[in-house]
Amino acid sequence: MIKKTAADHQTRKPLKNNLKFRHPIILTIIIYYLTSQTSLSLLLSSHPTPPPIPILPIPTSQQISWQLTEMAMFLHFGTNTFTDSEWGTGHADPSVFNPTAFNASQWVNVAKDNGFSRVILTAKHHDGFCLWPSEYTDYSVKSSYWRNGTGDVVKELAQAAKSAGLQLGLYLSPWDRHEPTYGETLEYNEYYMGQMTELLTRYGEIREVWLDGAKGKKEKDMEYFFDDWFSLIHQLQPGAVIFSDDGPDTRWVGDESGAAGTTCWSLFNRSAIKIGDTDPKYSGEGDPLGHDWVPAECDVSIRPGWFWHASQVPKSAIYLLDLYYKSVGRNCLLLLNVPPNSSGLISQEDIRVLEEFSEIRKSIFSYNLAKGALISASSVRGGPSDSHYGCHNVLEEGIYSYWAPGKAQSNWVLNLDFPEAVTFNILLVQEPIQLGQRIIDFHLDFLNEEGEWEEAVRGTTVGYKRLLRFGKVESSKLRLVIDKSRADPLVSYLGIFEDPFSILGHVSNFSSTSLSKDGKPLQQNMYHHSPSVSSF
């Protein structure tokens, strides 16, 4: 047995005292470590969750700007206006063109006052007559009596559009029934590009260049150098989008009825289409597997013809509303042709219809009923406290704020709880298309009187904007369910509205509707009834 001596005790005492001295240091280190870890954790948690990866393809800035305009006004004007024809022969005497009351500002004001953000002029139609004094031909306004041969329709429209803050687009027909070099591949392509250069360098900013593949049967064979044309356009007007059967920026919807398919993708395969030889179904619906972003444009005329004819009357405002649902409401742009008359003005009967159309849209869409609801979501990206992707974003108009669900979820639902029952028959859904088109299938449910969920409407594809009409529903609880999506679905805007004007299954083609001050129809004088209406 080893005994501890006094010396041992004396040597251990200082060690004990030393430990007492070191305890506060160790404690300080521990506290500092824990505090720093907590601060780091708080610092990391204060950073927002980054946005989801875009799903390709995605639009260019020019395509987004184009889509945001929603509606453009087409202006078919030329010698055909004075000869009561649609496809001119190219042999009409230039002297017939004499719009004595021509006023480009009237055209622009009619467009702006009724919700159109862009005007597109037929600078040259198939007859080859030019509405500007081209240096490459005498078949133009410089050979007419109008303005003593010094007039320039394109110039006056460009100035009026700029003053009013409207975007300008130009249509230059590839088919030319007057030009002698048409049919000579190299010579005509040089001629065409020379005229295109004039249009894109003389008149300021051009936001859209419109081309088509129209050509009559038994006409001369002609090879167009489309790739050269497109490169030239983008070089001279980098802010412009190009319209043709296959884009490259926006595509023809496949018909001239003004309606897209009930399923309509902005995704497209340009290689699947040849300009002048389209597949209407493919053009109208797009391609969920498409590699290119080429949204559709729906062109239609307010009158039976594209050019003004004294014997024709415009379609009704209700009919135009139907077209709006089937074009803008199906992820497209509505290009509505409103042809100026032979005096050089838009006719008063057309203006009245446009004003009624504008008032009806304002009456329906001026207030989003969903803003009166308490909104919740099945999940939120980054967690419920992350305001960047919260469900409240869907009540803010625009595409740059949105609801994003949590990652790796299979249940995608937005719930709307109203303090009392609301009556509605329109659903509006938008996606933030800058991150790609995602939603494949969705539906809207409401809680019925028996306390059970009942489907109000079902739809496919959303894109920039989707509008769905259905029978009137009255309920205080709704839910939007995303059934299928190419990636985590994103919703930028959700709207619930009541449309008292549309009658499911019946639309008047030509009529005049009178509205009261509150936007309700007072009377409707029918001229013609469309026998059927495509799906809503």
Image: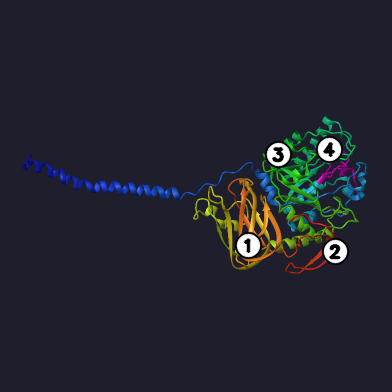
Q: Earlier in the sequence, mark 2 or mark 3?
A: 3
Dot 4: element: loop
Measuring from the top left, give residue 173's x and y in whole percent.
82, 41
Q: Looking at the image, do the residues carrying marks 1 and 4 touch, with CB atoms under 8 Å apart?
A: no
Q: Residue 327's spot in the image, x, y percent?
A: 74, 52
Q: Amino acid at mark 2?
A: Met
What is the C-alpha distance between the residues marked 3 and 4?
38 Å
Query: What label sits on residue 180 in the rendered view?
Result: none
Q: CA distance from mark 4 to mark 2?
A: 49 Å
In primary-sequence order, the first of circles 1 and 4 is: 4
Q: Assess whether residue 463 is covered by the magenta stretch.
A: no
In the image shown, does 266 or 3 lie closer to the viewer? 3
Magenta region: which residues?
Answer: 122-145
Q: Percent position (x, y) of residue 16?
A: 16, 45
Q: Residues within 10 Å of mark 3 (few under 14, many from 20)?
A: some
The residue that mark 2 highlights is: 526
Residue located beneath label 1 in the image: 446
Task: Look at mark 3 in the image and give the residue it sits on.
Answer: 269
Q: Give the Cα separation between the discs numbered 1 and 4.
A: 64 Å
Q: Are marks 2 and 3 in contact (CB under 8 Å)?
A: no
Looking at the image, residue 145 sits to the left or right of residue 285; the answer is: right
